[in-house]
Image (cartoon, grey):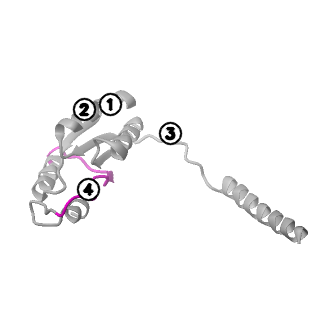
Amino acid sequence: MLRGVVIAGSAVGTIVGCSILVKDFTVTKYSGDETLEGKTVVITGANCGLGKEAATQFAKRKADVIMTCRDLEKCLKSRVEVVLKSGNKNVMCSQLDLASLQSINDFVTRLKKKKKEVNILVNNAGVMRCPRTVTSDGFEMQLGVIFF
């Protein structure tokens, strides 16, 4: 009985060990040193959490970062931190409330006026566990913010 358990354990250990070795030798590892110079990144909900960290990481890679938030004042405060951490001054803030189609259209118009081509879009903004409300356009809040 014990011998069977030992053999089965050895077989499992060998299979797991071999799969780890195969993965280590065949999968390219991410080094994180790629440059994104000349690329424009738009991040929604960029004033805190994952959005702010994404802005910092893209800025460290020399991308032109556009941080978007509902509250422009909060965005500007977060921008200062991103610029200090990344050393990249090509970080801009723009007001964008995804609960308003008018705000979305205004943001797109501003982008077009600047003739900015968006290379990377990080759809980070969202709402959770909010009371049942509707956007200014009549959509349920979560659906309006996340989908439209």
- Asked whether 9 or 38 is in front, the reply is 9
Q: Badge 4: few (under 14), some or many (20 or more) residues near its Cα, within 10 Å?
A: few
Report whether 6 appears left or right of 90.
right
Residue 127's disc is: 4
The amino acid sitting under disc 1 is: Glu
- Figure quadrant of residue 136: bottom left
In front: 33, or 129? 129
The kind of secondary structure the magenta stretch mainly shows is: loop
How far is disc 4 from disc 1 in space, using C-alphas? Answer: 24 Å
Q: Nearer the viewer, mark 3 or mark 1?
A: 1
Query: Is residue 22 placed above or below 34 in the rendered structure?
Result: below
**Which amino acid type is shown beneath numbered disc 3?**
Asp
- First in sequence, mark 3 or 2: give its number: 3
Q: Position of residue 107 (x, y in %)?
A: 16, 50
- In reply to whether residue 124 is colored magenta, the answer given is yes
Density class for disc 2 (Cα within 10 Å; few <14, some 14-19, many ≥20) is few
State if disc 2 and disc 3 touch (CB < 8 Å): no
Percent across and percent down for residue 62 are 38, 36
Choose the circle earlier in sequence order: 4 or 1: 1
Residue at coordinates 77% horizontally, 65% vertically from top-left? 12
Q: Secondary structure at mark 2?
A: helix
Residue topped by disc 2: 77
Magenta highlight range = 113-132
Read off the residue under disc 1: 81
Where is 133 relative to 122, above or below? below
